[in-house]
């Protein structure tokens, strides 16, 4: 792995006409660091993550992932994005999804790791079902499998606990810890203040601007986001 | 990942998905769709064919076709390029699936490989449609113009394919280069204006006129017409080259909206189509209204809400409404000079403008949960929205009237034009209100008499004052033009009043009619008959019990003295026994047996 930071952002801005969703933001996330992105609704967390994932066009600024410009293929190869709205094909089973996503990223397709992920998330019995028949929670779990089944060094996660039951939430927390332990940088946007206890760094946003960057306690977070 | 590896993985995916899709196809539905499409196509061809007529054009008209045909067809080409550039600036023309954006385009596969497949497939379909439409148009042209059928067929198809290729290629290019919307509008608009200027002869030949020359090859062969297909091919190839630059933000926004819009179109849900089209075009109300809010408390909150809505119209909506007014005005000029079918174009243009004018009402209908919480009836709220819709629509109609009467060429007289403008605006508002309030037709609702777009055809009736004034000018009827137009407008005002009443009492009428329809249904009739039969049985049983009591007999024909315990069961107890199920449809079982008569016979 190169010495380049997992994520380097300079002057990243997003504006919709006269509404500024994200003010110019500079940020550097070293490789392997876990970051919690916190803030109230409309603070710009999802906008920031979607721009880093390449799903939103920045109005201004630059994004580099592992030293590669966002538009380069290598940047896409190292970034995994787990959205808050699971997006799945209606006509592929969960196994086919995982196989396909893995192969798109140069993997061997469905393997033991994919199977173990499904088992841990309680999807073992539904591997050959179409996700179109899944509940919201099961679809979210499927999205988790797809985000983790492929190689990456930067994991972007947007509101991961929405729709998950308690066991599912615990498994996801374990998985995030494992991913972090394996050396990947994680950037998790969440409303859950308790999550900040598990990360190296917290970043608080309010109205599109960074209001805190450092190590925070739950009480501090609640104070910052007005909870 | 290499390009070859990307292609292989994507090919595997398509194979797997095709397999699943083919397994899920409902063949009867698919065949029915083909059948319906066929029927609709035949009807359209017959209608257009009838409109075109059969007689050969005069020598003068043929000369006009030779001289102005390329420019007129060039305008069509310019329109396709304009539309393509505009669509491309908004992320079109590709309509990808959302999972493709999330999983394929975010993966390290070559985006060009991933996008060219869907692009070629979309182009293949559009090309087939363009060729078919062009070929049919060629055959229709043959009925009036000289030439042989094969020539017109081939030239029509080639021109259709060229138009599609140019539009699609420009769209791909604009999308790949992330051309800003204003730039797309500027370039396309200039080309469009040039093509229009070429038609009226005020500008030198537009480049699109050279492409348009291809369309009249059977009449006049201009070698420059061959440039069209070549340009279209180049546009497509260059567009394909740059397709990998497509914005994922635009593509993802488009994925959801295009899918929803297709669904809304299949349901004939005009309002949803309208709202989705605005979202696709990113047409958002202004955050700062054109007119500042009135500080004092409004006396008429619904009217005030409507004014605030109109005050936030984005510039694109204003331009569209003005454009529709201009089209309507020019059409009225044509009608005045004898081209009566232009009333349809005038009506449709005004109806489209009125759909924008009815936006406050549409918003109310889009949010029934909110409307239902108001302490007044929905109908009353809707009626209070009508004045602003009428005002805006009539203002648009007056603008159309100004265009119709403008002092260039042979315009319409100011009097008839203004009266027609008012009537046209009023009827267009009525059509738009009916379309918006009625919503998507309910397939099981027998009260839905017309589809929303046909309801919009009411606007065409708004041109009747002009027809009346024209008849007066031609001496066909007595009153002078303006009174003739006013007379018709008075009658049309009655239509507006009826529409207002329909909006106010629609829920009540609908409820009454639904109840009446339900009562007339065979199921309801069967249930009513069963109820009557049960009552009859009970009455007969009572009479029988009374006669037995008088005769001193019990149920088994024995003396009543045998014991009062053997008295016939009470009315309530009997009522419980023949509890025939009130199932709809064919009835049988206990309640159908003539119990009383049998006992009488005994």
Image (tube, coloured by chain):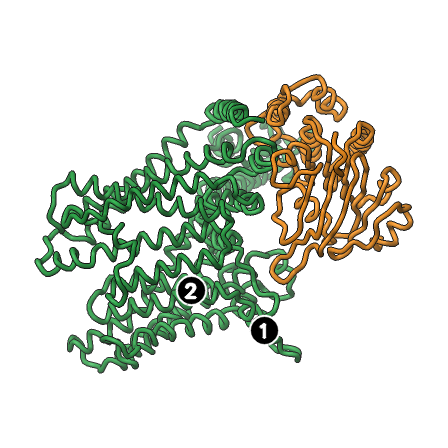
Chain colours: A orange, B green
Establish if B162 lies above or below B2: below
Whether residue B336 sits left or right of residue B348 in the image: it is left
Whether residue B44 sits left or right of residue B277 in the image: it is left
Please, which residue is most extreme toward the front here? A3
> Can residue B13 be seen at all in this image of the molecule?
yes
Q: Secondary structure at mark 2?
A: helix
Q: Which mark is residue B422?
A: none
Residue drawn at point x = 63 percent, y = 19 percent? A108
Q: Which quadrant would residue B109 be assigned to in this image?
A: top right
* Host chain of mark 1: B
Q: Quadrant of the N terminus of chain B?
A: top right
In the rendered structure, which disc, 2 or 1, sits on the residue that comes first in sequence?
Answer: 1
Q: What residue does disc 2 label?
A: B353
Establish if A163 lies above or below B257: above
* Host chain of mark 2: B
Q: Secondary structure at mark 1?
A: helix
Whether residue B52 sits left or right of residue A52 in the image: it is left
Please, which residue is most extreme toward the top here? A112
Whether residue B599 sits left or right of residue A121 in the image: it is left
Residue drawn at point x = 89 percent, y = 46 percent? A216
Q: Give the Cα distance between marks 2 and 1.
A: 21 Å
Residue B446 position in % (x across, y down):
42, 48
Q: Callout 2 environment at 10 Å: few (<14), some (14 to 19), or many (20+)? A: many
Q: Looking at the image, how many numbered discs can be counted on the residues?
A: 2
Residue drawn at point x = 43 percent, y = 62 percent? B432
Q: What residue does disc 1 label?
A: B304
Q: Nearer the viewer, residue B92 or B500?
A: B92
Q: Are marks 2 and 1 in contact (CB under 8 Å)?
A: no
Residue B562 position in % (x across, y down):
68, 28
> Can residue B515 be seen at all in this image of the molecule?
no
Residue A184 position in % (x across, y down):
77, 32
Which mark is nearer the camera, 2 or 1?
A: 2
């Amino acid at each position: 792995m190169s010495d380049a930071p997992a994520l380097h952002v300079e002057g990243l801005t997003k504006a919709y006409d006269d509404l500024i969703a994200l003010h110019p933001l500079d940020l550097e996330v070293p490789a392997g660091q876990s970051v919690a992105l916190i803030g109230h609704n409309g603070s710009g967390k999802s906008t920031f993550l979607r721009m880093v994932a390449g799903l939103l066009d920045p109005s201004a600024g630059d994004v580099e992932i592992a030293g590669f410009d966002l538009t380069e293929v290598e940047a896409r190869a190292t970034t995994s994005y787990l959205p808050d709205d699971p997006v799945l094909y209606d006509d592929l089973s969960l196994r086919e999804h995982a196989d396909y996503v893995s192969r798109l990223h140069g993997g061997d397709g469905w393997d033991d790791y994919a199977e173990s992920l499904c088992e841990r998330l309680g999807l073992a019995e539904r591997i050959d079902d179409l996700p179109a028949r899944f509940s919201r929670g099961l679809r979210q779990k499927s999205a988790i499998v797809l985000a983790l089944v492929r190689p990456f060094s930067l994991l972007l996660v947007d509101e991961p606990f929405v729709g998950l039951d308690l066991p599912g939430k615990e498994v996801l927390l374990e998985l995030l810890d494992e991913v972090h332990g394996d050396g990947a940088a994680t950037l998790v946007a969440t409303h859950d203040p308790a999550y900040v206890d598990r990360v190296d760094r917290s970043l608080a946003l309010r109205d599109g601007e960074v209001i805190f960057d450092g190590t925070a306690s739950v009480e501090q977070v609640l104070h910052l986001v007005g909870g | 990942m290499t390009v070859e590896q990307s292609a292989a993985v994507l090919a595997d995916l398509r194979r797997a998905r095709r397999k699943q899709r083919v397994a899920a196809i409902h063949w009867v539905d698919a065949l029915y769709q083909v059948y319906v499409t066929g029927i609709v196509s035949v009807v359209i061809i017959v209608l257009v064919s009838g409109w075109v007529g059969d007689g050969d054009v005069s020598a003068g008209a043929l000369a006009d076709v030779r001289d102005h045909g390329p420019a007129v067809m060039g305008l069509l080409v310019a329109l396709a390029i304009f539309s393509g550039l505009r669509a491309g600036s908004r992320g079109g023309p590709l309509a990808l699936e959302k999972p493709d954006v999330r999983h394929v385009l975010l993966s390290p596969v070559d985006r060009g490989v991933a996008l060219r497949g869907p692009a070629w497939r979309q182009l293949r379909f559009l090309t087939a449609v363009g060729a078919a439409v062009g070929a049919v148009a060629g055959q229709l042209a043959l009925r009036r113009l000289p030439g042989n059928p094969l020539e017109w067929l081939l030239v029509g198809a080639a021109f259709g394919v060229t138009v599609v290729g140019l539009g699609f290629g420009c769209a791909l290019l604009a999308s790949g280069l992330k051309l800003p919307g204003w730039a797309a509008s500027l370039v396309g608009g200039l080309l469009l204006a040039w093509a229009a200027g070429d038609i009226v002869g005020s500008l030198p030949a537009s480049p699109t006129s050279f492409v348009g020359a291809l369309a009249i090859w059977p009449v006049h062969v201009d070698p420059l017409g061959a440039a069209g297909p070549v340009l279209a091919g180049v546009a497509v190839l260059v567009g394909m080259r740059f397709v990998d630059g497509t914005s994922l933000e635009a593509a993802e926004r488009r994925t959801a909206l295009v899918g929803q819009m297709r669904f809304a179109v299949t349901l004939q849900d005009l309002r949803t189509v309208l709202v989705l089209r605005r979202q696709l075009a990113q047409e958002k109300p202004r955050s700062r209204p054109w007119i500042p809010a009135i500080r004092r408390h409004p006396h008429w909150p619904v009217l005030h809400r409507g004014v605030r809505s109109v005050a936030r119209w984005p510039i694109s909506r204003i331009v569209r409404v003005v454009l529709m007014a201009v089209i309507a005005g020019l059409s009225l000029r044509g009608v005045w000079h004898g081209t009566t079918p232009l009333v349809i174009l005038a009506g449709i243009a005004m109806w489209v403008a009125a759909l924008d004018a009815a936006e406050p009402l549409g918003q109310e209908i889009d949010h029934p949960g909110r409307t239902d919480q108001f302490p007044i009836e929905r109908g009353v709220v809707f009626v209070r929205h009508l004045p602003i819709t009428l005002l805006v629509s009539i203002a648009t109609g007056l603008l159309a009237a100004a265009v119709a009467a403008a002092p260039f060429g042979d315009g319409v007289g100011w009097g008839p034009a203004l009266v027609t403008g008012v009537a046209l605006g009023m009827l267009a508002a009525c059509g738009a209100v009916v379309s918006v309030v009625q919503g998507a037709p309910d397939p099981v609702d027998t009260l839905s008499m017309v589809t929303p777009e046909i309801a919009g055809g009411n606007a065409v009736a708004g041109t009747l004052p002009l027809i009346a004034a024209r008849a007066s000018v031609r001496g066909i009827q007595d009153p002078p033009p303006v009174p003739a137009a006013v007379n018709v407008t008075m009658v049309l005002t009655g239509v507006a009043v009826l529409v207002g009443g329909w909006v106010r009492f629609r829920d009540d009428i609908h409820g009454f009619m639904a109840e009446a329809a339900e009562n007339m249904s065979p199921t309801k009739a069967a249930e009513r008959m069963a109820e009557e039969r049960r009552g009859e049985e009970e009455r007969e049983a009572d009479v029988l019990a009374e006669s037995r009591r008088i005769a001193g007999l019990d149920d088994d024909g024995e003396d009543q003295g045998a014991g009062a315990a053997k008295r016939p069961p009470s009315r309530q107890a009997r009522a419980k026994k023949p509890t025939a199920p009130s199932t709809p449809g064919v009835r049988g079982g206990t309640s159908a047996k003539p119990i009383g008569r049998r006992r009488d016979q005994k």
